[in-house]
Amino acid sequence: MPGRTRKETPLKNPDRPYLALGLEGSANKLGAGIIKHLEDGSTSVLSNVRHTYITPPGEGFQPRDTALHHREWALKVISDCLSKAGVSIHDVDCICFTKGPGMGAPLQSVALVARTLSLLYNKPLVGVNHCVGHIEMGRDITGAQNPVVLYVSGGNTQVIAYSRQCYRIFGETLDIAVGNCLDRFARVINLSNDPSPGYNIEQEAKKGKRLVSLPYTTKGMDISLSGILSSVEAYTTDKRFKPEASLSDQEDIITPADLCFSLQETVFAMLVEITERAMAHIGSKEVLIVGGVGCNERLQEMMGVMAQERNAKVFATDERFCIDNGIMIAQAGLLSYRMGFQTPLAKSSCTQRFRTDQVHVSWRA
């Protein structure tokens, strides 16, 4: 906050290098990463390996099938992660895993792997909040000091600010997440799931020429997206909708590209609005965009326009760190571990509902 003296961080520089293995599997990405904290307080990403469960066009991913994918690929992903980092499992100080939020079956599969490694190699476990993992990795990579965080992904949409060792939620979606909204519409118009539905929506939107009317549903600091999804889906049954229309057609038509463009513009404008409101409330001059949808260049561009008008800065990462990954779990977990936190084996279960503001952020002042 402006005008306040910066407090000294409770996290001291380590007296030796620390290594952590992070395991992520809350949705359709299985990730493993090794992070190193050095004596001078800097961090080094030694490896960041990920494998994605991709379904055919028009289909989503089911919890059971996603969990089977994670079990099938866990050994290879972790082996590749250790190999690329040039370390042994014996060298790591702790094993960090996603405790929640996320899909139940995939979370349990990865937690089972983490518990097994912990018991086999006598390493402490650290359960990590998925959302906090995104925030801490974003802060570390970008250098943002005390930003308003826009966390946008397939399962979460939140505007967050830090205060008194807690990431406090200023606003959030009242129904479905923005990534879920985009993914579900991608299935309606039969876009590929490779590399992700949201990415293919973004590419299709670049061809759009027409902005169709969609409900703009900000509700104070919160937003609602289910009605927008229903409205944009309704356009696919409109007589003007032409799935195969070329861009040269001059008729009164609506193309899939137009609908992708309109959906992005409307939803992202809502996100920018509630983010700006949070910035005004706490007096921040920084915005950090994290989560899978944070890769979207149009969202970054729109946020940049708003930030420029406020003499503020936008911080974002690329797909290596925006999209779910193991290294973000390793980062948040190692910060907790260095503050003395460990997860006892008896409490290493997962929870699908684990809110960002339930975490004690002991490593920040």
Image (cartoon, rainbow, N blue to C red):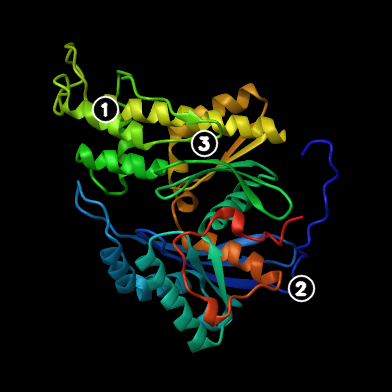
Q: Amino acid at mark 3?
A: Asp
Q: What amino acid type should be assigned to the residue bearing mark 2?
A: Asp
Is label 3 in a helix, a strand or a loop? strand
**Mark 3 vs mark 2: in front:** 3
The mark that comes first in sequence, 3 or 2, is 2
Neighbourhood count class around disc 2 (C-alpha, 10 Å): few under 14, some 14–19, many 20 upward? few
Crowd around label 1: few <14 · some 14–19 · many ≥20 (10 Å): many
Specify the quadrant of the image occupied by residue 26. bottom left
Which mark is first along the chain, 1 or 3?
Answer: 3
85 to 257, vertically: above or below? below
Q: Residue 227 has which mark? A: none
Q: Earlier in the sequence, mark 1 or mark 2?
A: 2
Any part of residue 202 in sight: no
Label 3 crowd bin: few (<14), some (14–19), many (20+), radius 10 Å: some
Contact flag, marks 3 and 1 (Cβ < 8 Å): no
* Callout 1 amino acid: Ala
The residue tagged 2 is 15
Asked if one can make out residue 33 in the rendered structure from this viewpoint, the answer is: yes
| Residue found 28% across the figure and 29% down from its top | 232
| Residue 255 in the image, given as x and y percentages of width and height | 21, 24
Residues under labels 1 and 2: Cα distance? 55 Å
Distance Cα–Cα, label 3 vs label 2:
44 Å
Where's the N terminus, which quadrant?
top right
Q: Where is residue 242 shown, x and y percent of the image?
A: 15, 24
CB-based contact (under 8 Å), mark 1 and mark 2: no
- Is residue 279 shown left or right of residue 301? right
Residue located beneath label 1 in the image: 257
* SS of the residue under disc 1: helix
Residue 145 position, x and y percent, is 70, 45
Mark linked to residue 222: 3
Report the residue at 30% width, 30% height from top: 260
Question: Element at badge 2?
Answer: loop
